Amino acid sequence: MIIDETNMEQSKETNLNRTRKGIAGSYLPAIISFVLLLGLDQVTKYWITHNMELSASIPIIKGVFEIHYIQNPGAAWGILANQQILFYVITVFALAVGIWFYVRCKQSGSFHDLRALVILILAGAAGNFIDRLRFRYVIDFIYVKLIDFPVFNIADCYATIGFLLMAVLVLFKYKEEDFEHFRK
């Protein structure tokens, strides 16, 4: 039996390229979505910091909604102010778990809706993480004055909406046996 080494090498190279393209190609929409969401968050924060003074407000709907620039060194409502190491650890852990969850969902071939929400949550976590790394605070600017809700930002919207919708799906759409794939 004669083995054609040239064909074997070409076959190995073709399989390796196919695997590389398959992995990159299958995650490419997620990566692009993540980058676009993260970019929107960072662009809005850049615009705020370069066009507004700290604590300044721009009324959008008088008495209801305004852009109000603050620097938040804590979490929601300013709790745990200046505990940056804690925020770094929590965020890195959350990002790792989110990526793991996304990959497991992708491997199962289903959970398209959960995967989209994971991307939203990851973009939110990463957006605020970038602020914390760069400035040691988060740039917040969305203020619902009507109900005096704490000032927040686009990344907060991503994470909050993503978690709420994920909770609804897990509670009302999926059953426990749908998640057997994660126990293996």
Image (cartoon, rainbow, N blue to C red):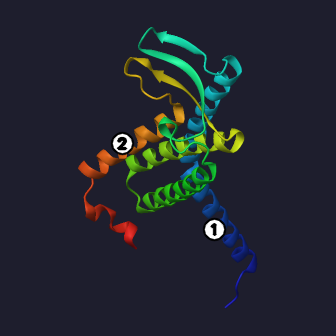
Q: Is residue 11 above or below residue 118?
A: below
Spatial distance from mark 2 to mark 1, Cα to Cα?
A: 41 Å
Residue 161 percent location from the top left of the image? 41, 38
Instruction: Please tell me which residue lies in front, 34 or 69.
Output: 69
Instruction: Please tell me which residue lies in front, 23 or 38.
Output: 38
> For mark 2, what is the residue?
164
Foreground mark, 2 or 1, reads 2
Residue 24 location, quadrant:
bottom right
| Residue in view at x 61 percent, y 26 percent | 44
Q: Is residue 116 above or below residue 85?
A: above
Instruction: Please tell me which residue lies in front, 16 or 91.
Output: 91
- 2 and 1 marks in contact (CB < 8 Å): no
What element does badge 2 sit on? helix
Q: Which amino acid does label 1 sit on?
A: Asn
Q: How many numbered marks appear?
A: 2
Dot 1 alpha-carbon crowd within 10 angstroms: few under 14, some 14 to 19, many 20 or more = few
In the visual, does 151 lie left or right of 48?
left
| Residue in view at x 58 percent, y 48 percent | 28
Q: Can residue 63 be seen in this view?
A: yes
Task: Looking at this view, name the residue that lies furthest to the bottom.
Answer: 1
| Residue in view at x 65 percent, y 22 percent | 54
Residue 38 percent location from the top left of the image? 59, 38
Tag on residue 15?
1
Residue 46 location, quadrant:
top right
Q: What residue type is labelled 2?
A: Leu
In the visual, does 125 lie left or right of 136?
left
